[in-house]
Amino acid sequence: QTSTHSALLLRINLPKSLILIHHTEEAESKQDGNGEADGEEESTEQEVIVIQDTGFTVKIQAPGTEPFDLQVSPQEMVQEIHQVLMDREDTCHRTCFSLQLDGNVLDNFAELKSIEGLQEGSLLKVVEEPYTVREARIHVRHIRDLLKSLDPSDAYNGVDCNSLSFLSIFTDGDLGDSGKRKKKGNELEQIDCTPPEHILPGSKERPLVPLQPQNKDWKPMQCLKVLTMSGWNPPPGNRKMHGDLMYLYLVTVEERHVSVTASTRGFYLNQSTTYTFNPKPANPSFLSHSLVELLSQISPAFKKNFTALQKKRVQRHPFERIATPFQVYSWTAPQVDHAMDCVRAEDAYTSRLGYEEHIPGQTRDWNEELQTTRELPRKNLPERLLRERAIFKVHSDFAAAATRGAMAVIDGNVMAINPGEETRMQMFIWNNIFFSLGFDVRDHYRELGGDAAAHAAPTNDLNGVRAYGAVDVEGLYTLGTVVVDYRGYRVTAQSIIPGILEREQEQSVIYGSIDFGKTVVSHSKYLELLEKTSRPLKVQRHKVLNEKNDVAELCSSVECKGIIGNDGRHYILDLLRTFPPDLNFLPVDGEELPPESQRYGFPRQHRHRLACLRQELIEAFVEHRYLLFMKMAALQLMQQKANKDSNKTDLPAITEASEMSTESNGKELDESIPGLAQAKELAETLVAEDGSDPKSREVVLNACKAVGSISNTSFDIRFNPDIFSPGVRFPEESTEDVQKQKQLLKDAAAFLVSGQVPSLIKDCLDHSTLPMDGATLTEALHQRGINVRYLGTVLEFVEKTPAKAQLEHFYRIGICELITRCAKHIFKTYLQGVELSALSAAVSHFLNCFLSSFPDAVAHLPADELVSRRKSRRRRNRVPGGGDNTAWASLTPSELWKNIASEAQNYYHFTLHCESVDQVVEKYGFQKITLLREISIKTGIQILIKEYNFDSRHKPAFTEEDILNIFPVVKHVNPKASDAFHFFQSGQAKVQQGFLKEGCELINEALNLFNNVYGAMHVEICACLRLLARLNYIMGDHAEALSNQQKAVLMSERVLGIEHPNTIQEYMHLALYCFANGQLSTALKLLYRARYLMLMVCGEDHPEMALLDSNIGLVLHGVMEYDLSLRFLENALTINTKYHGARSLKVALSHHLVARVYESKAEFRSALQHEKEGYTIYKNQMGEAHEKTKESSEYLKYLTQQAVALQRTMNEIYKNGSNASIMPLKFTAPSMASVLEQLNIINGIIFIPLSQKDLENLKAEVQRRQQLQELGKSEEPSEDSPLELEDKIPID
């Protein structure tokens, strides 16, 4: 099924000709009935690399239908036409057919261009073929998929890469052209703009049910009551010889019970009943080649409903139904009826190992597939695309298989390979994947922190695999690795090195050490391969001593083992120390950390000794050192210049400089010295030279020494990952080197605390980083190389920041993350003691203790369902997930919160003063629903979607019926599409320089390549579509913007989740484009949806909420709902004032927007008051002469005139009573154009009239803005200054 989807989408999404660097005049999509777009490119004289030839049209003739045209490309395989036919409304019920051209059967796996005589206009006949058992099964499964195509239960259950999407409910499918058909006239009257009560500013209720609005399509039209395998399977021998393949049992909607034979010729009714076997054909037998044709003849309801269902299925946006590359799980689900489903039942029992039906006769050899795809050629673009696509596909399949295997292991459905040992030590093999549990077996990690180390090692190892995979050295192989957390256990799944199971580990390791450095071996081939990774991964080649004092040379940490498999490939495994240790969390006797670290109370004891620095930190540190290196060289050159006059060559200043290098090397250095810039240029040329001139050599040498470079002639920083590893010794001659390395590690640890943490806080203060929930916060930390174990330190830093009030949102999210992570740690050990039958009771009890105000949550032991006290107690704990005690039931809320506080203290070194959930909520301003969302996502809990009463003091919030499922939390490698990413980045760069058209083309190109590698659904494609939509919008193509942004929203919902912060942003962008397209009610619905989601994810008090409320307020102003509009705009004003400071330009703009609404209401006094505030800010920030200030003062004059006129009229009325001659007042509803103009301003979009001259101005403007930005002034773009994208486009 998955392959069908991806093939389909590729057809829908990819222009048939992939041209790389092209300037399309107009890539118009011709749509045919099938939803394929075919781009025709006219390329100008630029260099063009054509990968594929352009498409052509063939005619298809299927039995019983009119011939139809199908657009195909020469690159496609015949099989892809099969997939399309199986998806088309009129041919979807056929699976077992061949395509014939002039009577010749086409080979399924042939490319179209290789088929003789196939050309534009050829007629392909669909010919029904005889069934085999395999084909019959495929047919039944396909029919079942068609019957279930609108049913969301697979998405709720997290299977087959289905996931939820709700966008179509809010748009009623009427985006773009279909939406235009509604009458254009004055649409304003019929719109109901009142939002639900809980969305209004200030509302305290946070309902959960609206998270999943009811989709009317999901109340499925029933086509069949039952379709299952019959109990008479498999056919006895003599019936086999009559062509019987299998028997099905059906109950139609009309309550007719029938027995069907699947035979080689098709499907027919037989005379069997439930209890008597009579395989003879019934009379009439209705023999049909397709089950659908048979059912349509015997059940009128089936015929009617199946047709309607297929119509609906084809109308859905493809993005709503295509499989995602990795499974996304939903933490809430409604109560879904459990219906009979033969295919699902059969799948569960035959436990389809890894989809064997695609691969005849064996399970997949994962290791072979993973390594072979790596070996594919990569010399040119088409080869790289093919290779990356193969790597990505195998990875996502492997992740899915590993996840299923890990769950089977914990659920006790897999036999261990060492069944005699105790549970924690067992290892498993399933479907050619090796599984081990995250416990410290055989005291392997005793020195390093026991189980805590064994729990951290797999994720470290995964980071190592990711890093080596990204460097991608030919000839060096890593294992497929997936880490799965499920039911409190951590399982590592790895592909198996050929031959490793037959031999002992000792004899196969030819590089590295299996006992943490006692015996160490090296190998020249491994050194040569690892040498290539040394520079990109910043790993220093070094020598270590083994027990016998022999020297071995390594280019990785000692634990990294090299094994040559039976396939002759060089594998490396155990990459848990790829990156150097983090000294802030590794106290070493006799070693002092730099003062910056000590100031924050480092070094601190950590649970284990495997804490390492993140790769992002290493990169940032090296970057930082490089700048320093340049400055040092430049300083010396200036001094040499200064000393040219006097003959002093001996420079005292260098020593000074190297002393200051550690900490205060920042801006002070820059500003204090004039002419530094020229010297820097000099330094750069100097570094580039070969260092022949002794003077310059000395300069470089000094600078190298100062920054700790490992070479004396050029800048090169690398780390020795074995420093401070217990049990690793270094030879005498490298003592000095080891000292240098120790210093470097200390500097890196200090840089994290003194450089990266403050820079994160600074980015939060100037709103270039806006985390909304735990996941986005973690991402923000990781981007800067800060590990989450520093969360306590970051929060302390926020507490000490003078502008703490402007970081309140960040602080709250941080505390929330800290609490839910502590709860997760406790939950992990809590779950390990729970037996399967008590799982839902235990989880609901834990959630009650965590969230419910009910003081004495009592657990209900599940004794009620099956009472048998005579359990044999002998076979205890034979399976990993088979805990058998009831200790979990004794947990109380106060005990849990005590544990959370002590966990926060021990792990994060952060003091929480709270003894209950209500105190936390009170003290930090949390919402319980947010805590529930965070803990559910982190632990994989799925709960019933209903309104929970957390605050009742009389009964607990959760019962065991509310816990629907527990899902795995999966970590794996995400292979990248490198070429596509380069195109995307250069497209972004072009856009930021103001070359919109070129940028747009590059990004379209990137989109093509992304689709080529990832298929249709992927996070990076989502970013691509969002940027494209924004560019379309700026360049005035609103319809195209709408269509791209719709795809971005759907994709974000499907790939990231329906309430992920990214999805919320996508909804806001889509609303803007809807408004610009005149679809006002849709725009409002989308904004209300975004506001609901944001309230749930982070509450009302967040800087992004101000932007959202300004948007809602403006749209409401546009539809003349003034009072509602004011509620939102005034809320935005409050939030902006809080987070941007009362003097900010954002606040001035907020005042102006509020003033405009008051003006429309003719309340001029209030309008004047607000506009004055705004005017004052503009005057102080921009000066009298700035056009913003002038505009504001004009508007003030106008308001004053209106106010005076109004007053006159009122006086007139008072004087003369009702017969007064009243001057008509101008009450104006704002024009749509003016509302849209304001919307564009607040969303940072400025339109560009592009001409050559404008481009010049634009460049100057961009430079001016960058300078402004450095002064921190640039908050609001001025309206007419032509400027492109204001917001920074996030790069994943």
Image (cartoon, rainbow, N blue to C red):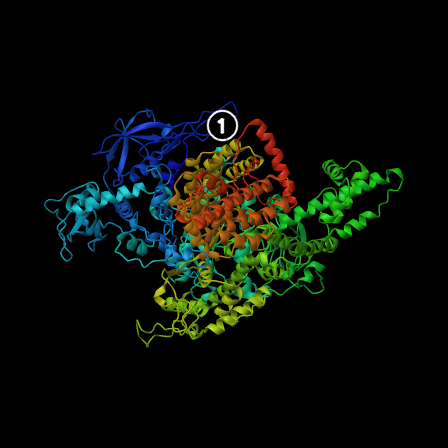
Judge whether 223 appears above or below 1232 on screen: below
Residue 698 can be seen in this image: no
Residue 1237 can be seen in this image: yes
- The residue where tag 1 is placed is 23
Name the foreground residue: 677 vs 569: 677
| Quarter the N terminus occupies | top left
Q: Amino acid at mark 1?
A: His
From the viewer's perspective, tell me whether residue 693 is left or right of residue 147. right
Where is residue 471 shown, x and y percent of the image? 57, 44
**What residue sits 13% from the left and 52% below the top?**
278
From the viewer's perspective, tell me whether residue 509 is left or right of residue 713. left
Residue at the right extreme? 646
From the viewer's perspective, tell me whether residue 703 is left or right of residue 440. right
Judge whether 489 appears above or below 162 on screen: below
Residue at the left extreme? 283
Where is residue 780 shown, x and y percent of the image? 56, 52
Where is residue 83 shown, x and y percent of the image? 32, 38
Q: Quadrant of residue 1284?
A: top right
Q: Secondary structure at mark 1?
A: loop
Name the foreground residue: 222 vs 953: 953
Name the foreground residue: 14 vs 1030: 1030
Q: Quadrant of residue 852?
A: bottom left
- Circle count: 1
Where is residue 979 shown, x and y percent of the image? 52, 37
